Image (cartoon, rainbow, N blue to C red):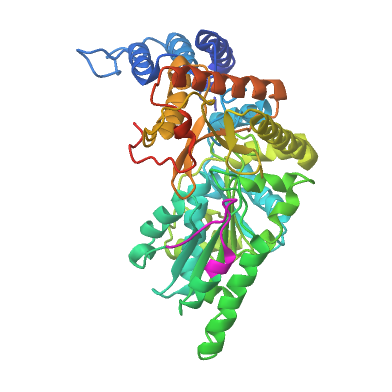
Amino acid sequence: MTRPVDHRSDLPELVGLTLAALTDGNRRRGGPLPRGGPSQVREAIRATLGASPDRASMLPQEGIGAPAALTALVSAFAAGSADPADPWCAAHLHCPPLAVAVAADLAVSALNPSLDSWDQAPAATTVETEVVAALAELAGLDPSRASGTITTGGSESNLLGLLLARDAANEPTIRVFRSAAAHLSIDRAATILGLASRPVVVIPTDDRDRMRVDLLGQALAAHDGPAVVVATAGTTDAGAIDPLPDLVAAVDDHRARLRHRRPPGGHRPESLGWLHVDAAYGGGALFSDRLAELLSGIAQADSVALDLHKLGWQPAAAGVFLTPRPDGWPSLRAAQADYLRSDDDEDAGFPSLLDRSPRTTRRADCFPIAVTLRALGRGGLGTRVDACHELARHAARTIRADHRLELAFPVTLSTVVFRYRPPSTAARSGEPPAPGRLDQLNAEIRRTLLVDGRAVVGRTRTGPDRAVQLKLTLLNPDATPAHVDALLALIAATGDELASRDHDLRDDDMDEHATDEGGVP
Protein backbone atom coordinates (compact mmCIF):
# COMPACT_ATOMS: atom_id res chain seq x y z
CA MET A 1 0.00 0.00 0.00
CA THR A 2 1.42 3.39 -1.05
CA ARG A 3 1.66 6.00 1.67
CA PRO A 4 -0.04 9.33 0.96
CA VAL A 5 2.05 12.31 -0.05
CA ASP A 6 3.69 14.01 2.94
CA HIS A 7 3.18 17.72 2.41
CA ARG A 8 6.04 18.34 4.80
CA SER A 9 8.32 17.67 1.83
CA ASP A 10 7.91 21.39 1.07
CA LEU A 11 9.19 22.26 4.52
CA PRO A 12 12.91 22.74 3.74
CA GLU A 13 12.14 25.26 1.01
CA LEU A 14 9.57 27.09 3.12
CA VAL A 15 11.84 27.20 6.16
CA GLY A 16 14.54 28.71 3.98
CA LEU A 17 12.12 31.37 2.74
CA THR A 18 11.04 32.06 6.33
CA LEU A 19 14.59 32.60 7.54
CA ALA A 20 15.36 34.90 4.62
CA ALA A 21 12.17 36.88 5.24
CA LEU A 22 12.98 37.18 8.95
CA THR A 23 16.37 38.65 8.02
CA ASP A 24 14.73 41.06 5.58
CA GLY A 25 12.11 42.15 8.12
CA ASN A 26 14.72 42.69 10.82
CA ARG A 27 16.71 44.83 8.36
CA ARG A 28 13.64 46.88 7.47
CA ARG A 29 12.80 47.46 11.13
CA GLY A 30 16.36 48.47 11.97
CA GLY A 31 15.90 48.62 15.73
CA PRO A 32 14.09 47.06 18.68
CA LEU A 33 10.60 47.92 17.36
CA PRO A 34 8.99 49.59 14.34
CA ARG A 35 8.94 53.36 14.03
CA GLY A 36 5.78 55.41 13.82
CA GLY A 37 3.63 54.06 16.62
CA PRO A 38 0.41 52.03 16.51
CA SER A 39 -1.26 53.69 13.50
CA GLN A 40 1.66 53.21 11.12
CA VAL A 41 2.23 49.60 12.21
CA ARG A 42 -1.46 48.82 11.81
CA GLU A 43 -1.63 50.26 8.28
CA ALA A 44 1.55 48.47 7.17
CA ILE A 45 0.29 45.09 8.41
CA ARG A 46 -3.19 45.60 6.95
CA ALA A 47 -1.70 46.41 3.58
CA THR A 48 0.40 43.23 3.59
CA LEU A 49 -2.62 41.17 4.66
CA GLY A 50 -4.56 42.51 1.69
CA ALA A 51 -7.00 44.51 3.76
CA SER A 52 -7.97 47.96 2.53
CA PRO A 53 -10.40 50.75 3.46
CA ASP A 54 -12.99 49.46 0.99
CA ARG A 55 -12.43 45.75 1.72
CA ALA A 56 -11.88 44.70 5.32
CA SER A 57 -11.31 40.99 4.67
CA MET A 58 -7.85 39.50 4.20
CA LEU A 59 -9.36 36.28 2.78
CA PRO A 60 -9.10 36.26 -1.04
CA GLN A 61 -11.17 34.07 -3.32
CA GLU A 62 -7.96 32.63 -4.77
CA GLY A 63 -4.77 32.32 -2.75
CA ILE A 64 -1.45 33.81 -3.82
CA GLY A 65 0.53 30.65 -3.04
CA ALA A 66 2.67 29.58 -0.09
CA PRO A 67 6.03 31.11 -1.14
CA ALA A 68 4.56 34.55 -1.90
CA ALA A 69 2.31 34.65 1.17
CA LEU A 70 5.04 33.41 3.49
CA THR A 71 7.73 35.75 2.20
CA ALA A 72 5.57 38.87 2.30
CA LEU A 73 3.91 38.21 5.63
CA VAL A 74 6.96 36.98 7.54
CA SER A 75 8.95 39.99 6.39
CA ALA A 76 6.14 42.37 7.41
CA PHE A 77 5.61 40.51 10.68
CA ALA A 78 9.30 40.81 11.60
CA ALA A 79 9.44 44.45 10.53
CA GLY A 80 6.41 45.20 12.70
CA SER A 81 7.46 43.25 15.79
CA ALA A 82 9.32 44.10 18.95
CA ASP A 83 12.55 42.09 18.88
CA PRO A 84 13.52 40.68 22.30
CA ALA A 85 16.98 39.87 20.94
CA ASP A 86 17.73 43.60 20.62
CA PRO A 87 19.56 44.87 23.75
CA TRP A 88 17.30 47.93 23.82
CA CYS A 89 14.12 45.83 23.93
CA ALA A 90 13.93 45.69 27.71
CA ALA A 91 10.42 46.50 28.91
CA HIS A 92 8.82 43.19 29.78
CA LEU A 93 9.37 39.59 30.85
CA HIS A 94 9.85 38.92 27.13
CA CYS A 95 12.93 36.84 26.42
CA PRO A 96 14.89 36.15 23.25
CA PRO A 97 14.34 32.39 22.76
CA LEU A 98 17.31 30.13 22.29
CA ALA A 99 17.90 28.98 18.70
CA VAL A 100 17.95 25.36 19.85
CA ALA A 101 14.53 25.80 21.47
CA VAL A 102 13.12 27.48 18.36
CA ALA A 103 14.39 24.60 16.22
CA ALA A 104 12.83 22.07 18.61
CA ASP A 105 9.58 24.05 18.47
CA LEU A 106 9.54 23.61 14.70
CA ALA A 107 9.61 19.83 15.18
CA VAL A 108 6.59 20.10 17.47
CA SER A 109 4.67 22.12 14.88
CA ALA A 110 5.58 19.67 12.12
CA LEU A 111 4.50 16.56 14.06
CA ASN A 112 1.57 18.29 15.81
CA PRO A 113 1.14 15.92 18.79
CA SER A 114 -1.62 16.54 21.32
CA LEU A 115 -1.17 15.46 24.92
CA ASP A 116 -4.81 14.64 25.65
CA SER A 117 -4.28 10.98 24.76
CA TRP A 118 -1.30 8.63 24.46
CA ASP A 119 -2.07 7.59 20.89
CA GLN A 120 -1.83 11.21 19.74
CA ALA A 121 1.48 11.82 21.52
CA PRO A 122 3.37 8.59 22.35
CA ALA A 123 6.80 10.20 22.69
CA ALA A 124 5.57 13.53 24.02
CA THR A 125 3.70 11.82 26.87
CA THR A 126 7.00 10.48 28.19
CA VAL A 127 8.87 13.71 27.45
CA GLU A 128 6.42 15.79 29.51
CA THR A 129 6.49 13.31 32.39
CA GLU A 130 10.29 13.43 32.53
CA VAL A 131 10.46 17.23 32.17
CA VAL A 132 8.01 17.65 35.06
CA ALA A 133 10.05 15.26 37.21
CA ALA A 134 13.32 17.08 36.42
CA LEU A 135 11.88 20.49 37.24
CA ALA A 136 10.21 19.17 40.40
CA GLU A 137 13.61 17.90 41.57
CA LEU A 138 15.17 21.27 40.70
CA ALA A 139 12.58 22.91 42.99
CA GLY A 140 13.38 20.48 45.81
CA LEU A 141 10.26 18.30 45.46
CA ASP A 142 10.37 14.51 45.49
CA PRO A 143 10.38 13.66 41.75
CA SER A 144 9.03 10.16 42.44
CA ARG A 145 5.86 11.63 43.96
CA ALA A 146 5.47 15.12 42.55
CA SER A 147 3.10 15.72 39.67
CA GLY A 148 2.55 18.60 37.33
CA THR A 149 1.98 19.79 33.81
CA ILE A 150 3.27 22.18 31.18
CA THR A 151 0.97 25.19 30.95
CA THR A 152 0.48 28.26 28.80
CA GLY A 153 2.22 30.35 31.46
CA GLY A 154 1.95 31.75 34.95
CA SER A 155 -1.72 32.65 34.61
CA GLU A 156 -2.79 29.06 33.92
CA SER A 157 -0.39 27.73 36.55
CA ASN A 158 -1.81 30.12 39.16
CA LEU A 159 -5.33 29.07 38.20
CA LEU A 160 -4.35 25.43 38.79
CA GLY A 161 -2.78 26.28 42.16
CA LEU A 162 -5.99 27.92 43.39
CA LEU A 163 -8.09 25.12 41.91
CA LEU A 164 -6.18 22.43 43.82
CA ALA A 165 -6.32 24.55 47.00
CA ARG A 166 -10.09 24.95 46.66
CA ASP A 167 -10.54 21.20 46.08
CA ALA A 168 -8.35 20.34 49.08
CA ALA A 169 -10.40 22.57 51.36
CA ASN A 170 -13.74 21.37 49.97
CA GLU A 171 -15.38 24.29 51.77
CA PRO A 172 -16.89 27.54 50.50
CA THR A 173 -15.15 29.44 53.30
CA ILE A 174 -11.67 29.19 51.75
CA ARG A 175 -10.14 32.62 51.31
CA VAL A 176 -7.27 33.87 49.16
CA PHE A 177 -4.46 35.98 50.68
CA ARG A 178 -1.92 37.63 48.39
CA SER A 179 0.46 40.58 48.48
CA ALA A 180 -0.22 43.97 46.94
CA ALA A 181 2.47 43.11 44.37
CA ALA A 182 1.01 39.75 43.31
CA HIS A 183 0.27 39.11 39.65
CA LEU A 184 -3.15 40.14 38.34
CA SER A 185 -3.84 36.50 37.39
CA ILE A 186 -4.41 35.65 41.07
CA ASP A 187 -7.53 37.80 41.33
CA ARG A 188 -8.69 36.62 37.92
CA ALA A 189 -8.29 32.99 38.98
CA ALA A 190 -10.19 33.65 42.20
CA THR A 191 -13.06 35.11 40.17
CA ILE A 192 -13.12 32.22 37.69
CA LEU A 193 -13.14 29.67 40.52
CA GLY A 194 -15.85 31.43 42.50
CA LEU A 195 -13.47 32.31 45.33
CA ALA A 196 -13.97 36.05 44.96
CA SER A 197 -17.39 35.93 46.64
CA ARG A 198 -15.30 36.54 49.73
CA PRO A 199 -12.95 39.30 48.58
CA VAL A 200 -9.28 38.44 48.14
CA VAL A 201 -7.27 39.73 51.09
CA VAL A 202 -4.50 42.04 49.93
CA ILE A 203 -1.45 42.19 52.22
CA PRO A 204 0.71 45.34 51.98
CA THR A 205 4.34 45.10 50.88
CA ASP A 206 7.48 46.50 52.44
CA ASP A 207 9.84 49.03 50.84
CA ARG A 208 11.38 46.23 48.74
CA ASP A 209 8.02 45.06 47.28
CA ARG A 210 7.83 41.91 49.49
CA MET A 211 4.76 40.74 51.36
CA ARG A 212 4.76 41.81 55.02
CA VAL A 213 4.56 38.57 56.95
CA ASP A 214 3.53 40.31 60.17
CA LEU A 215 0.43 41.70 58.49
CA LEU A 216 -0.30 38.35 56.86
CA GLY A 217 -0.20 36.74 60.31
CA GLN A 218 -2.72 39.27 61.62
CA ALA A 219 -5.02 38.67 58.64
CA LEU A 220 -4.85 34.88 59.03
CA ALA A 221 -5.54 35.14 62.75
CA ALA A 222 -8.79 36.96 61.94
CA HIS A 223 -9.91 34.19 59.55
CA ASP A 224 -11.37 30.97 60.97
CA GLY A 225 -11.62 29.05 57.70
CA PRO A 226 -9.29 27.41 55.19
CA ALA A 227 -6.84 29.77 53.52
CA VAL A 228 -4.73 29.78 50.38
CA VAL A 229 -1.71 32.07 50.67
CA VAL A 230 -0.11 33.12 47.39
CA ALA A 231 3.58 33.96 47.68
CA THR A 232 5.35 35.75 44.85
CA ALA A 233 8.89 34.77 43.92
CA GLY A 234 9.75 37.51 41.48
CA THR A 235 7.26 40.37 41.45
CA THR A 236 6.53 41.74 38.00
CA ASP A 237 7.56 45.26 38.91
CA ALA A 238 10.59 44.86 41.16
CA GLY A 239 11.57 41.19 40.82
CA ALA A 240 11.18 40.93 44.60
CA ILE A 241 10.87 37.57 46.32
CA ASP A 242 8.57 37.17 49.29
CA PRO A 243 10.20 35.64 52.42
CA LEU A 244 9.19 32.05 51.62
CA PRO A 245 10.37 30.35 54.85
CA ASP A 246 8.36 32.85 56.91
CA LEU A 247 5.29 32.29 54.74
CA VAL A 248 5.64 28.52 55.14
CA ALA A 249 5.65 29.04 58.90
CA ALA A 250 2.62 31.36 58.75
CA VAL A 251 0.58 28.78 56.81
CA ASP A 252 1.70 26.01 59.18
CA ASP A 253 0.60 28.13 62.15
CA HIS A 254 -2.81 28.68 60.55
CA ARG A 255 -3.23 24.95 59.98
CA ALA A 256 -2.26 24.16 63.57
CA ARG A 257 -4.67 26.75 64.96
CA LEU A 258 -7.61 25.42 62.95
CA ARG A 259 -6.83 21.78 63.75
CA HIS A 260 -6.88 22.70 67.44
CA ARG A 261 -10.31 24.34 67.11
CA ARG A 262 -12.00 21.78 64.87
CA PRO A 263 -13.14 18.26 65.74
CA PRO A 264 -10.57 15.60 64.79
CA GLY A 265 -10.89 13.63 61.57
CA GLY A 266 -11.46 14.57 57.97
CA HIS A 267 -8.98 17.42 57.82
CA ARG A 268 -5.64 16.89 56.14
CA PRO A 269 -3.13 19.71 56.72
CA GLU A 270 -3.48 21.10 53.19
CA SER A 271 -7.27 21.29 53.55
CA LEU A 272 -6.89 24.04 56.15
CA GLY A 273 -4.05 26.02 54.64
CA TRP A 274 -2.40 25.94 51.22
CA LEU A 275 0.74 27.77 50.10
CA HIS A 276 1.01 28.48 46.39
CA VAL A 277 4.25 30.05 45.14
CA ASP A 278 4.02 32.09 41.97
CA ALA A 279 7.63 31.77 40.80
CA ALA A 280 6.82 32.45 37.15
CA TYR A 281 9.66 35.00 37.05
CA GLY A 282 11.91 34.10 39.95
CA GLY A 283 11.85 30.34 39.34
CA GLY A 284 14.70 30.80 36.88
CA ALA A 285 16.95 31.54 39.86
CA LEU A 286 16.86 27.80 40.63
CA PHE A 287 19.31 27.28 37.75
CA SER A 288 21.86 29.61 39.40
CA ASP A 289 24.20 28.54 42.19
CA ARG A 290 24.43 32.19 43.21
CA LEU A 291 20.70 32.98 43.31
CA ALA A 292 18.98 29.67 44.11
CA GLU A 293 19.10 30.42 47.84
CA LEU A 294 16.64 33.27 47.22
CA LEU A 295 13.98 30.59 46.72
CA SER A 296 14.74 28.75 49.95
CA GLY A 297 11.45 27.36 51.25
CA ILE A 298 9.87 26.71 47.86
CA ALA A 299 10.14 22.95 48.43
CA GLN A 300 7.63 23.27 51.29
CA ALA A 301 4.96 24.80 49.03
CA ASP A 302 1.77 22.95 48.14
CA SER A 303 1.98 24.14 44.54
CA VAL A 304 4.45 26.07 42.41
CA ALA A 305 4.23 28.04 39.16
CA LEU A 306 7.31 28.41 36.94
CA ASP A 307 7.71 30.05 33.52
CA LEU A 308 10.57 29.07 31.22
CA HIS A 309 9.62 31.63 28.59
CA LYS A 310 11.11 34.17 31.00
CA LEU A 311 14.42 33.17 32.66
CA GLY A 312 14.53 29.97 30.62
CA TRP A 313 14.68 31.43 27.10
CA GLN A 314 11.94 29.28 25.60
CA PRO A 315 9.43 30.23 22.93
CA ALA A 316 6.08 30.94 24.52
CA ALA A 317 4.32 29.06 25.89
CA ALA A 318 6.50 27.27 28.42
CA GLY A 319 4.78 27.53 31.77
CA VAL A 320 5.16 24.82 34.40
CA PHE A 321 2.87 23.82 37.27
CA LEU A 322 4.18 21.55 40.04
CA THR A 323 2.67 20.03 43.16
CA PRO A 324 4.25 17.55 45.60
CA ARG A 325 0.99 15.55 45.68
CA PRO A 326 0.33 13.04 42.89
CA ASP A 327 -3.38 12.67 43.68
CA GLY A 328 -4.53 16.24 44.27
CA TRP A 329 -6.45 16.85 41.02
CA PRO A 330 -10.08 15.85 41.81
CA SER A 331 -11.83 18.51 39.69
CA LEU A 332 -9.91 17.52 36.59
CA ARG A 333 -10.49 13.80 37.22
CA ALA A 334 -14.24 14.27 37.61
CA ALA A 335 -14.98 14.67 33.90
CA GLN A 336 -14.00 11.73 31.69
CA ALA A 337 -14.14 10.94 27.98
CA ASP A 338 -13.89 7.29 26.93
CA TYR A 339 -12.51 8.18 23.52
CA LEU A 340 -9.47 9.79 25.19
CA ARG A 341 -8.91 7.71 28.31
CA SER A 342 -10.18 4.42 29.71
CA ASP A 343 -9.21 2.45 32.79
CA ASP A 344 -8.54 -0.77 30.88
CA ASP A 345 -6.15 1.04 28.52
CA GLU A 346 -4.27 2.46 31.51
CA ASP A 347 -4.20 -0.97 33.15
CA ALA A 348 -2.69 -2.27 29.91
CA GLY A 349 0.13 0.30 30.13
CA PHE A 350 -1.17 3.20 28.02
CA PRO A 351 -0.74 6.29 30.25
CA SER A 352 -2.90 9.39 30.05
CA LEU A 353 -2.12 12.99 30.99
CA LEU A 354 -5.70 14.11 30.43
CA ASP A 355 -6.26 14.79 34.14
CA ARG A 356 -3.28 17.12 34.41
CA SER A 357 -4.71 20.10 32.56
CA PRO A 358 -7.99 21.97 32.08
CA ARG A 359 -7.20 21.90 28.35
CA THR A 360 -7.96 18.95 26.09
CA THR A 361 -5.99 19.52 22.90
CA ARG A 362 -2.58 20.43 24.28
CA ARG A 363 0.56 21.14 22.30
CA ALA A 364 3.84 19.40 23.23
CA ASP A 365 5.47 22.54 24.60
CA CYS A 366 7.48 20.22 26.83
CA PHE A 367 9.73 19.27 23.92
CA PRO A 368 11.70 22.54 23.44
CA ILE A 369 12.18 22.57 27.22
CA ALA A 370 13.55 19.01 27.15
CA VAL A 371 15.95 19.83 24.30
CA THR A 372 17.16 22.95 26.13
CA LEU A 373 17.73 21.13 29.42
CA ARG A 374 19.78 18.48 27.63
CA ALA A 375 21.67 21.00 25.48
CA LEU A 376 22.66 23.53 28.15
CA GLY A 377 22.26 21.71 31.46
CA ARG A 378 21.67 23.51 34.72
CA GLY A 379 25.11 25.12 34.50
CA GLY A 380 24.54 26.62 31.07
CA LEU A 381 21.16 28.04 32.03
CA GLY A 382 22.53 29.25 35.37
CA THR A 383 25.29 31.16 33.57
CA ARG A 384 22.65 32.97 31.52
CA VAL A 385 20.63 33.81 34.64
CA ASP A 386 23.75 35.19 36.32
CA ALA A 387 24.59 37.29 33.25
CA CYS A 388 21.17 38.96 33.36
CA HIS A 389 21.51 39.52 37.10
CA GLU A 390 24.89 41.18 36.58
CA LEU A 391 23.45 43.43 33.86
CA ALA A 392 20.75 44.58 36.28
CA ARG A 393 23.28 45.27 39.03
CA HIS A 394 25.38 47.25 36.56
CA ALA A 395 22.30 49.24 35.52
CA ALA A 396 21.59 50.07 39.16
CA ARG A 397 25.14 51.37 39.61
CA THR A 398 24.83 53.51 36.49
CA ILE A 399 21.51 54.94 37.69
CA ARG A 400 22.97 55.82 41.09
CA ALA A 401 25.83 57.65 39.37
CA ASP A 402 23.52 59.83 37.24
CA HIS A 403 21.90 62.69 39.18
CA ARG A 404 18.99 62.71 36.70
CA LEU A 405 17.97 59.11 37.49
CA GLU A 406 16.52 57.76 40.72
CA LEU A 407 16.41 54.06 41.69
CA ALA A 408 13.15 52.80 43.22
CA PHE A 409 14.17 49.33 44.49
CA PRO A 410 17.37 47.38 45.01
CA VAL A 411 18.00 44.73 42.36
CA THR A 412 16.91 41.18 43.21
CA LEU A 413 16.73 39.39 39.86
CA SER A 414 17.02 41.23 36.55
CA THR A 415 14.51 44.08 36.87
CA VAL A 416 15.52 47.71 37.42
CA VAL A 417 12.87 50.28 38.38
CA PHE A 418 13.77 53.98 38.29
CA ARG A 419 12.60 57.36 37.10
CA TYR A 420 13.98 60.43 35.42
CA ARG A 421 14.18 63.71 37.33
CA PRO A 422 15.23 66.86 35.43
CA PRO A 423 18.42 68.60 36.52
CA SER A 424 17.99 71.66 38.72
CA THR A 425 16.96 74.89 37.03
CA ALA A 426 16.16 78.31 38.40
CA ALA A 427 12.97 78.10 40.46
CA ARG A 428 10.18 80.63 40.34
CA SER A 429 9.67 81.70 43.92
CA GLY A 430 6.26 81.34 45.38
CA GLU A 431 4.82 79.31 42.49
CA PRO A 432 3.74 75.75 43.35
CA PRO A 433 4.81 72.82 41.17
CA ALA A 434 2.48 71.51 38.49
CA PRO A 435 0.79 68.44 40.03
CA GLY A 436 1.78 65.20 38.41
CA ARG A 437 4.10 66.75 35.82
CA LEU A 438 6.98 64.49 36.80
CA ASP A 439 4.75 61.46 36.28
CA GLN A 440 3.65 62.78 32.90
CA LEU A 441 7.25 63.42 31.90
CA ASN A 442 8.35 59.85 32.63
CA ALA A 443 5.36 58.46 30.75
CA GLU A 444 6.20 60.74 27.83
CA ILE A 445 9.83 59.56 27.77
CA ARG A 446 8.68 55.99 27.24
CA ARG A 447 6.13 56.85 24.56
CA THR A 448 8.64 59.00 22.68
CA LEU A 449 11.11 56.11 22.53
CA LEU A 450 8.35 53.73 21.38
CA VAL A 451 7.09 55.98 18.59
CA ASP A 452 10.66 56.66 17.41
CA GLY A 453 11.34 52.91 17.39
CA ARG A 454 14.51 53.48 19.43
CA ALA A 455 13.88 51.50 22.63
CA VAL A 456 11.26 49.41 24.44
CA VAL A 457 11.21 50.61 28.06
CA GLY A 458 8.59 49.54 30.59
CA ARG A 459 6.57 51.58 33.05
CA THR A 460 4.77 50.98 36.32
CA ARG A 461 3.59 52.79 39.44
CA THR A 462 5.10 52.39 42.89
CA GLY A 463 5.07 53.88 46.37
CA PRO A 464 2.32 55.41 48.47
CA ASP A 465 1.70 58.14 45.86
CA ARG A 466 1.69 55.60 42.99
CA ALA A 467 4.43 57.51 41.17
CA VAL A 468 5.10 56.59 37.54
CA GLN A 469 8.41 54.76 37.16
CA LEU A 470 10.37 53.45 34.20
CA LYS A 471 11.46 49.84 34.14
CA LEU A 472 14.11 47.70 32.47
CA THR A 473 13.58 43.94 32.54
CA LEU A 474 16.91 42.54 31.39
CA LEU A 475 16.45 39.04 29.97
CA ASN A 476 19.06 39.13 27.21
CA PRO A 477 22.26 37.52 28.52
CA ASP A 478 24.07 38.51 25.31
CA ALA A 479 23.59 42.21 26.03
CA THR A 480 26.58 44.03 27.49
CA PRO A 481 27.11 46.72 30.13
CA ALA A 482 27.85 49.12 27.25
CA HIS A 483 24.38 48.41 25.80
CA VAL A 484 22.80 49.13 29.18
CA ASP A 485 24.80 52.34 29.67
CA ALA A 486 23.85 53.59 26.20
CA LEU A 487 20.17 52.83 26.82
CA LEU A 488 20.15 54.69 30.15
CA ALA A 489 21.97 57.61 28.52
CA LEU A 490 19.30 57.68 25.79
CA ILE A 491 16.54 57.71 28.41
CA ALA A 492 18.17 60.56 30.30
CA ALA A 493 18.85 62.55 27.12
CA THR A 494 15.25 62.10 25.98
CA GLY A 495 14.10 63.32 29.39
CA ASP A 496 16.39 66.35 29.13
CA GLU A 497 14.98 67.22 25.72
CA LEU A 498 11.36 66.88 26.82
CA ALA A 499 11.97 68.76 30.10
CA SER A 500 13.65 71.64 28.25
CA ARG A 501 10.40 72.24 26.37
CA ASP A 502 8.33 72.35 29.57
CA HIS A 503 8.55 75.68 31.39
CA ASP A 504 6.49 74.28 34.29
CA LEU A 505 9.38 72.07 35.39
CA ARG A 506 11.49 73.85 38.00
CA ASP A 507 13.28 72.94 41.24
CA ASP A 508 9.97 72.86 43.06
CA ASP A 509 8.87 69.97 40.86
CA MET A 510 11.63 67.88 42.35
CA ASP A 511 9.84 67.94 45.68
CA GLU A 512 9.42 64.41 47.00
CA HIS A 513 5.71 65.04 47.51
CA ALA A 514 4.87 65.52 43.82
CA THR A 515 1.61 63.71 43.12
CA ASP A 516 -0.06 62.45 39.97
CA GLU A 517 -3.38 64.17 40.60
CA GLY A 518 -3.27 65.48 37.07
CA GLY A 519 -3.19 61.93 35.70
CA VAL A 520 -1.05 60.44 32.99
CA PRO A 521 -2.29 60.60 29.39
Residue 415 against residue 43 in the figure, above or below = below
Quarter holding the N terminus is top right
Identify the magenta region. Answer: 201-216
Farthest residue, direction bottom: 263
Camera-nearest residue between 496 and 247: 496
Quarter holding the C terminus is top left
The residue located at (61%, 74%) in the rendering is 252
Farthest residue, direction front: 429
State yes or no: residue 349 in magenta. no
Position of residue 321 measured from the top left corner of the image (x, y, whole percent): 57, 53
Position of residue 223 measured from the top left corner of the image (x, y, whole percent): 46, 76
Residue 450 seen: yes
Camera-nearest residue between 234 and 5: 234
Residue 501 against residue 463 in the figure, above or below = above
Position of residue 89 measured from the top left corner of the image (x, y, whole percent): 56, 25
Position of residue 24 measured from the top left corner of the image (x, y, whole percent): 54, 8
Instruction: Name which quarter of the figure residue 516 lies in.
Output: top left
Residue 383 against residue 180 in the figure, above or below = above
The residue located at (75%, 53%) in the rendering is 293
The residue located at (58%, 55%) in the rendering is 210
Camera-nearest residue between 171 and 360: 171
